[in-house]
Amino acid sequence: MRAVQVSRYGGPEVLEVVDLPVPDPGEGEVGIEVAVADVIFLDTLLRRGAGEQWGMAVPYVPGGAVAGTVRTVGAGVDERWVGRRVLARTGTEGASAEYAVASADLVVALDDDVADADAAALSRDAVTALRMLDVTRVGVGDRVLINAAAGGAGALLVQAALARGATVVGAARGERKLALVRDLGAEAVDYTLAGWTDKAVAAFGGERPTVLLEGAGGTPGQEAFTVLADGGRLVAYGAAGGFLEPDPDEVRRRRLQADGIAGVQLANDAVRELMGDALALLREGFWAPVIRQRYGLEGVADAHRGLEERTAIAKTLIEVVE
């Protein structure tokens, strides 16, 4: 099979298309013919070597989620899965290939009216978004500031927070990304411009945000943290500029509920449930992924480069079957 492989850690140039044996599913796993693979910023960090702390080693196939069709099953898995279209999480690797394996605990059947691309786009970003909304209890009357609002997860968060009755300001960089935030129905501010947090507060009618969903990191993340209302809630989930790490003393003094990405991680059964919820919400019209970049396997390096250089807008996908 054709697959993208990371044979050494480094920049996007280390991503190569190679021929590999089709992987056989082990006990409790399914083998999937991949139609579309997901790609997120985490994949670029793993490619640079961050995955070593989780036991990853080169060579490996990047990507952590796919939409496709089950072709084989391992021991202990119901054979009725064979031939079914599914959405599946493959872990931290294995997705950017013509075939992938996934634990049956992380596989959800797809209805005929759900496109492979839409499903793949929801595979990881939507689970993260739903978990963050639940942790921060976003609801009617909340003022929600979303940093990196034009990213894959950010665009979903904007839609979901609005649907829950919150007032939303989305921060991003550059007019193309700001235009997307406005198209989604939120106020938009550019976090690269001086005084942007004042503009965000002004957009909330002069009130500070009650919730911060922080996907930018670095300076924009720290600046957003400073305007969060006392008693507010935040999740720092983005690492493009380095994860926001609030001062614990300030968190206590301001009576904040602060969670990092580790605080919104879930066991397999909960992840699978949220995958199903995300697909159900898609069918109900609650949200829709915004897919702006599509690449074949030969374009995975370009996909990674766009995420790292922050030129990508909203969602990027790898279309294995073109």
Image (spheres, rainbow, N blue to C red):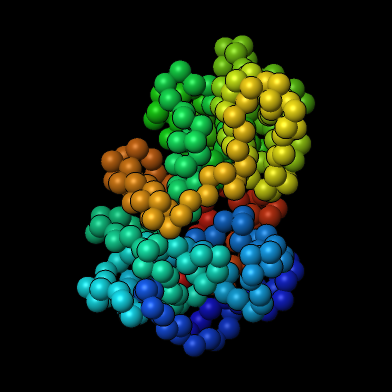
Residue at position x 73%, y 46% from top?
242
Q: Is residue 84 left or right of residue 242?
A: left
> Which sits in the foreground, 274 or 77?
77
Total numbered badges shown on the rendered structure: 0
Q: Which image quadrant is residue 43 in?
A: bottom right
Residue 163 visible in the displayed image: yes
Q: Nearer the viewer, residue 75 or 197?
A: 75
Q: Position of residue 263 (x, y in %)?
A: 57, 44
The answer to whether residue 145 is seen in the rendering is: no
Residue at coordinates 75% horizontally, 28% vertically from top-left?
249
The residue sitting at 22% across, 73% down in the picture is: 80
Above or below residue 45? Residue 129 is above
292 over 188 or under it: above or below: below
Q: Residue 134's quadrant in the figure?
A: top left
> Picture coordinates of residue 268 (x, y %)?
43, 58
Percent position (x, y) of residue 314? Answer: 54, 47
Which x, y percent locates residue 68?
A: 36, 68
Q: Residue furthest top?
A: 206
| Residue 12 image-quadrant placement | bottom right
Against 32, residue 249 (above or below) is above
- Residue at far left of view: 80
User: Residue at 25% of width from left, 73% of height from top?
Assistant: 78
> Which quadrant holds the C terminus?
bottom left
Left or right of residue 220: residue 316: left
Which of the pair 259/23 is nearer the observer?
A: 259
